[in-house]
């Protein structure tokens, strides 16, 4: 698990490799405006103005994976929010394949984070422009392989810190294969039931304490799964099940019990 690994054979999706770019997602949309339909991977060895959820800045150094998949999907507007979950499952699959199983504690957190234990090691940003019959979609995925930022305001980590030293090229090869497979199975939302189950198998346990900040309010409760469309279900302090379609989720440590 700790040694360098050779990259497996990737799906035959073209790859544009850039030494440095502000944001691979922005580069993908610029290419789409110029007529590129994809599918195409855009990767950068260094990203200086990456963006996370809610437009948070994300700077990352060489040795990590900064990749965006540009593609077009027919008739999917209602199911587009599910793509964060599709990409999360594919990211876990890719890390496990490239890193010989991956580190202990590798898991998903709704809607778009990959954690090792309680620390973030990867993030996903889905952006799209819908037209009448198609949607131009960019699936941005950043995985901290060799380095992680220390100023996120929450715990972060990287795979190397857990003994998994894999080059970005190896992870991209696995990610390309996993995304190809998971997107085909998702099928614009028609295959979401199986994808939902795969996501839950890679997430934290039902009953885990979480807090959700929707921007307008904050609620605490226990993780109660996903609904049929992929929204988060939380059981609040009064035992009421609530559905959340947008928000930042944080894990809440259980209060220590006093000795009796």
Image (cartoon, grey):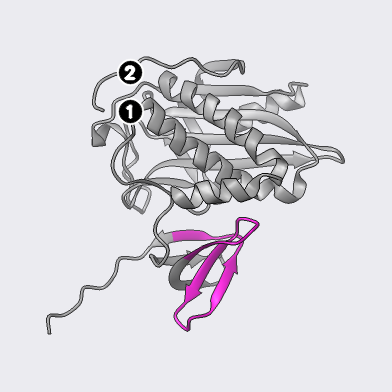
31 and 181: which one is in front? 181
Instruction: State which quarter of the image contains the N terminus.
Output: top left
The secondary element bearing badge 1 is classed as: loop
**Vertically, is 143 above or below 199?**
above
For the point 58% across and 23% down, which residue is it?
42
In this figure, which residue is indicated by the disc labeled 1?
Answer: 100
Question: Is residue 237 inside the magenta stretch?
Answer: yes
How many residues crowd mark 1 within 10 Å: few (<14), some (14–19), many (20+)?
A: some
Q: Is residue 260 visible?
A: yes
Left or right, 66 with respect to 36, comes to left
* Residue at 75 percent of width and 40 percent of height: 129
Which stretch appears magenta?
A: 224-249
Labels 2 & 1 near each other (Cβ < 8 A): yes
* Other residues around mark 2 within 10 Å, as few (<14) / some (14–19) / many (≥20): some
Q: Residue furthest right?
A: 132
Q: Is residue 113 above or below residue 100?
A: below
* Rendered view: 37 above or below 241: above
């Amino acid at each position: 698990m700790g040694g360098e690994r050779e990259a497996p054979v990737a799906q035959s999706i073209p790859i544009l490799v850039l030494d440095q770019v502000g944001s691979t997602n922005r580069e993908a949309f610029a290419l789409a405006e110029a007529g590129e339909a994809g599918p195409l991977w855009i990767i950068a060895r260094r990203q200086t103005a990456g963006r996370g959820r809610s437009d948070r800045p994300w700077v990352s150094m060489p040795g990590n994976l900064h990749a965006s998949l540009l593609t077009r999907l027919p008739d999917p507007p209602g199911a587009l929010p599910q793509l964060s979950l599709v990409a999360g499952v594919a990211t876990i699959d890719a890390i496990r394949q490239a890193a010989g199983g991956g580190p202990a504690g590798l898991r998903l957190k709704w809607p778009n984070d990959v954690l090792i234990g309680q620390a973030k090691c990867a993030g996903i940003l889905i952006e799209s422009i819908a037209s009448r019959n198609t949607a131009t979609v960019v699936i941005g995925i950043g995985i901290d392989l060799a380095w992680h930022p220390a100023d996120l305001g929450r715990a972060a980590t990287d795979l190397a810190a857990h003994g998994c030293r894999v080059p970005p090229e190896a992870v991209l090869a696995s990610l390309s294969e996993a995304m190809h497979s998971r997107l085909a199975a998702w099928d614009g939302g028609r295959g979401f039931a199986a994808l939902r189950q795969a996501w839950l198998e890679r997430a934290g346990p039902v009953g885990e304490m979480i807090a959700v900040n929707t921007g307008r309010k904050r609620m605490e409760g226990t993780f109660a799964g996903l609904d049929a469309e992929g929204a988060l279900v939380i059981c609040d302090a009064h035992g009421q099940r609530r559905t959340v379609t947008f928000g930042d989720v944080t894990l809440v440590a259980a209060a220590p019990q006093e000795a009796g």
